[in-house]
Image (tube, grey):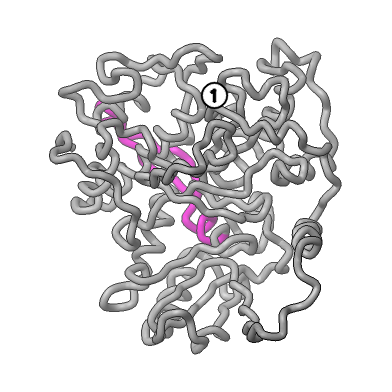
Amino acid sequence: MKFGWIAALALLPGLMGVTDMVGVQAQEAMSSASTAPKARPAALPRARPEQPKPDGIVFVCPRSHLPALRQQMQAWLGKLGIGSRLYKINEADWAAPTRQDGLGTLAFTLATPEHDTNTLDLHTRPEMGIGWARFTLVDAHGRQHVVKTVSHKEIVLAMMQHGRQTRLEAASCGVPSPSLQALQDQVGLRQTIVAWAEQLHWGWPDGGPAEWNNTYWDKGTPRPGRTLEAAMLDAFTHQTLYEIGCYTATKLAIVQGVMDYYRRIKRDVATSTLIHQRLWADGDPLVNIEPDDMWSFESDYDHEAEPAPGKLIRLKRGVAPRNFVPGDWAYILNTDPATRDKTGYEGSNAIYLGRNRFDDYYDDHNHAYTFEEKLDEVYQWRHGVFNRTRDAARIEKLSSASYVRLSWPPRLGGLVLRLRAVPYQFGFEAMPPVQLPAQTPQP
């Protein structure tokens, strides 16, 4: 639970009865209209209306690449078991001019109604045919064990759902030849992150200091002589030696997933080296893997300072409620003034695992929570429910309508921020630079 709070949220109105995306858009439109000028000054040229941005997986690439990308994408979707009836291809913008000459767009979007932005229930829809995948993890002793985890198919279907855009451009289109490698890497990377978050049972410090295995760690930093890779594997192999909050747990799962994908799964030495350098840029690998402005809502956030970029993560803003892609890092905010300052209960950092499951770092709930259970967990803190067994008498039962309201952003009476922290497209996008030290520890 990331520390801090913005005092203005104490004035939030009660839960609002907004039940669909149209309601949110209407409220935003009315808010804008109340301050907008009544008429455009005659001297101003008439603006050309913007074309609507397509949802789903969107390629913004040289027009010469688009036919090959379309063919490759359709073939890959077929291999994943995603039939052509499940999605639409937006070809209308192929020849549309963009800010750069010679570029066009190609979008793959689910053939669901435009107002359907929900990805949590995709696995319950028979036409999607979503199943499990099996993924092999390797521990600190070299032992292999298989976990049941999210499939590539579900990740891609979630990416194509309405409510957000996964954009691939420039080198992500393939250089010099059209290629899906950037997208396929993103899917494989997300599956690896989820796989490492599936079977966790770290200890919960409950407001006290974190506990680390001091053989490998000095308060969250690898000890001299210990590699980051060895220290990370120890945290996942000997979990009972660790007591950490959900903020640190989320970062551990993401760092381990990113390193493991490029080092062991893809065997990409160049990208593995780049990731290692970025993590060690400030001498503290677990610090600032996400950008500073992920926490811009906090009362102690310095809005005048230039926010530090994320080492591994960037932000996707404006994501629709109930829209999560497996591997997303989401934040569920405790909006209760009385309990929000209790250490560890400011909010909940959550990795989406697919199939309406979110992480359970402490194995309190058979390794996963549904979205509704996660909302309920955070909401019940305002009633003093910090242990579901001990404090069972204080639990306030929520209605279906309450769960809908809680799924909205805090400004509308809900708990879920409309941003997701997502991995970079390593090797395919220009990442914001981090200050690299003259020498970093060897991997």
User: Dividing the picture into quarters, in which one does residue 181 lie?
Assistant: bottom left
* Closer to the camera in the image, 25 or 36: 36
Is 150 inside the magenta-drawn segment? yes
Q: Is residue 342 visible?
A: yes
* Image quarter of residue 389: top right
Magenta stretch: give its range.
Answer: 132-157
Crowdedness of circle 1 by 10 Å Cα count: few (<14), some, many (20+)?
some
Q: Is residue 438 above or below residue 210?
A: below
Quadrant of the drawing holding the N terminus:
top right
| Furthest residue in direction bottom, as rendered | 95
Amino acid at the residue labelled 1: Asp
Residue visible at 47% across and 56% down?
Answer: 152
Q: Which residue is mark 1?
A: 363
- The answer to which of 48 and 241 lies nearer the viewer is 48
Nearer to us in this view, 162 or 147: 162
Q: Residue at x 63, y 44 (%)?
A: 417
In the rendering, at what x and y percent does residue 70 appear?
A: 45, 79
* Residue 210 shown left or right of residue 353 in the figure: left
The local secondary structure at tag 1 comes to: loop
Vertically, is 134 above or below 424?
A: above
Q: Can you say which quadrant of the picture contains the C terminus?
A: top left
x, y percent for residue 190: 44, 49
Q: Report whether 376 appears left or right of 301.
A: right
